[in-house]
Amino acid sequence: MKEYETITLEYDEGTALLRLNRPDKMNALSTQMRAEITDAATEAGRHARVLVITGEGRAFCSGQDLSDSGDVSAMDLERVLRDEYEPMLHAIGECPIPTISAVNGAAAGAGANLALAADVVIATESAFFLQAFARIGLIPDAGGTYWMPRQMGAAKAMGAALFAEPISAQQASDWGMIWEWAPDAEFDALWRNRADQLAKGPTQAYANMKKALRRSWENNLSDQLDYEAKLQGKCGMTRDFQEGVVAFLDKRKPDFEGR
């Protein structure tokens, strides 16, 4: 198992738990952390059946570490986004296994959009999401302009970007920005149960499900139906499909192989 300096990566049966581990900086994203997240997400995709990303301490992630590059005014933001953020976001977004962001506290700026990059976002009641970019004269980045309108709708996304106001976990759920939230005392049990459910599920079907849903934004109906049929044909040839049908007929829970 690899060791990292700014994150931890642990495996528990089929679950990979990636924990952002700079609590003294509210898990702000440094150059090193972005590289380590990229590497860990890639590794988890090879060795686990579900990836959970969460934060150590009271925050999920406070966004870009503005002290990481010395003179902030001299930062080449385009280079940082292209060379450091894009690989990280692709590693999460294209991960072949289901991914969960377990948002344990504040998720601000790039930290909010890191959370949204996962397939499923679960937040604790006291968490909030903040598109803070307008406060320092920037636009939402780290995928924010991609994920927000798709998950919240155009009106809410525009308001979140322009006003830069905190969005509570309950608001985020009501708006369709995240999957669900839980009271603080129930949060750990909820995301762990969700992760366990996915880790025991049909991993190959999940991978194809993710491909189909992501491709739907680019396809017209005919192209999407064609793509669906191709992927479903692949799923129909898996051991998991055979096991699912037999388990259904036997009135028992299926024992999915996953790989």
Image: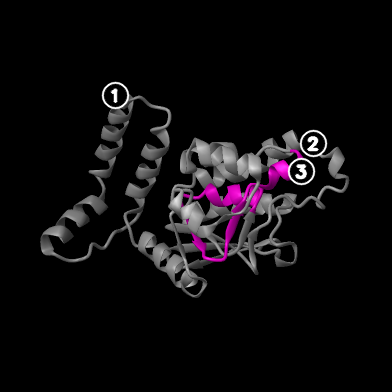
Q: Residue at x 17, y 66 (%)?
A: 252
Please report whichever mark, 1 or 3, sits nearer to the chain's N-terminal start. Answer: 3
| Residue at mark 1 to residue at mark 2: CA–CA distance | 42 Å
Q: How is the image coloured?
A: one colour
Q: Which residue is mark 3?
A: 136
Observer-side mark, 2 or 3, equals 3
The extreme bottom residue here reads 185
Q: Is residue 126 magenta?
A: yes
User: In the rendered structure, which segment of residues is drawn in magenta?
Assistant: 108-137
- Which residue is at the front of the view, 96 or 132? 132
Compared across the picture, whether 228 is left or right of 39 comes to: left
Q: Residue 249 appears at what percent x and percent y?
A: 11, 59
Is mark 1 in CB contact (under 8 Å) with mark 2? no
Q: Which residue is mark 1?
A: 222
| Residue that carries the numbered disc 2 in the rendered image | 76
* Residue 52 in view: no
In the image, is 135 to the left or to the right of 18?
right
Count numbered badges in the picture: 3
Front of the two marks 1 and 3: 3
- The amino acid type of the residue labelled 2 equals Asp
